[in-house]
Image: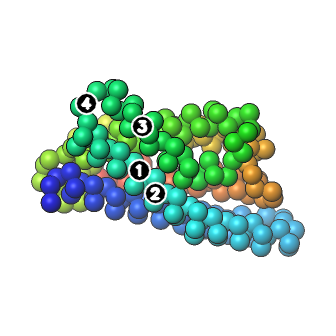
């Protein structure tokens, strides 16, 4: 197995683990929000079943496809690319529609909403940063065996690792803020406030977990 394939498998495994962690945060949060909120007894099961279907089916399948597209794009840039901005842009523009189609926030939003264009632009920026960082991971040719070692070999310092994470978190924050400022962008007919609360709290929990992980890796 060459180093690119080795790094691909390590990174893929880590991204899937992170997906499951984030989905579990969401499941726990939806339960706690529905249990503590003063909701009509008829609304609770509808919101809960919607979220369960979304997390078990749409979210997992869509996120797995996003992982495949992101890592595949990065691998293509390394193995078939010439290092030019033109080639990078071609790959991004060709693959982004697939990434967008599988984005969980995008799937729940109205494409004719006046804020949708801004949300789409943020999602593309997020995709670009993910591909750029995946390229860095895949290029590592040192003798490594797990994600922690791959991270240290890629970023060298905690500051650089945190900077890369912050860039992605800032785009996620920007996307969530767009939806929070005008929830009419959401297609869901009921329970918008619950969904937004879970989205925000889930993001904050994931951010905390990822920062703690960097501290552990670089200590």
Query: Quick check: marks 1 and 2 in contact, CB under 8 Å?
Result: yes
Q: Quadrant of residue 129?
A: top left
Distance, label 2 to label 4, CA atoms, is: 25 Å
On screen, residue 173 above or below 30: above
In the shown orientation, is residue 78 left or right of residue 200?
A: left
State the residue position of label 4: 83
Q: Which mark is residue 69?
A: 1
Residue at 57% of width from left, 69% of height from top? 56
State the residue position of label 3: 92
Q: Which mark is residue 95?
A: none
Residue at 51% of width from left, 37% of height from top? 124
Q: Residues within 10 Å of mark 2 (few under 14, many from 20)?
A: some
On screen, residue 42 above or below 175: below
Label 1: element kind: helix
Tally of marks? 4
Of labels 4 and 3, earlier in sequence is 4
Label 2: element kind: helix
Distance, label 2 to label 3, CA atoms, is: 15 Å
Distance, label 1 to label 2, CA atoms, is: 6 Å
């Amino acid at each position: 197995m060459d180093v690119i394939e080795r790094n691909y498998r390590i990174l893929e495994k880590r991204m899937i683990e992170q997906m499951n962690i984030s989905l579990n945060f969401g499941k726990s949060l939806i339960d706690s929000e529905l249990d503590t909120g003063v909701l009509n007894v008829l609304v609770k099961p509808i919101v809960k079943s919607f979220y369960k279907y979304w997390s078990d089916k749409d979210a997992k399948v869509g996120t797995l496809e996003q992982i495949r597209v992101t890592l595949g794009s990065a691998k293509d840039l390394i193995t078939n690319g010439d290092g030019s901005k033109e080639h990078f842009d071609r790959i991004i523009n060709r693959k982004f529609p697939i990434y967008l189609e599988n984005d969980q926030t995008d799937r729940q939003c109205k494409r004719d909403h006046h804020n949708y264009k801004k949300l789409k632009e943020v999602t593309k920026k997020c995709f670009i940063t993910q591909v750029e960082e995946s390229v860095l991971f895949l290029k590592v040719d040192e003798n490594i065996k797990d994600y922690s070692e791959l991270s240290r070999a890629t970023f060298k310092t905690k500051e650089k690792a945190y900077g890369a994470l912050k860039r992605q978190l800032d785009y996620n924050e920007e996307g969530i803020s767009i939806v929070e400022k005008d929830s009419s962008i959401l297609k869901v007919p009921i329970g918008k406030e619950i969904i937004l609360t879970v989205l925000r709290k889930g993001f904050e929990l994931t951010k905390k977990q990822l920062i703690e992980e960097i501290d552990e890796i670089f200590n």
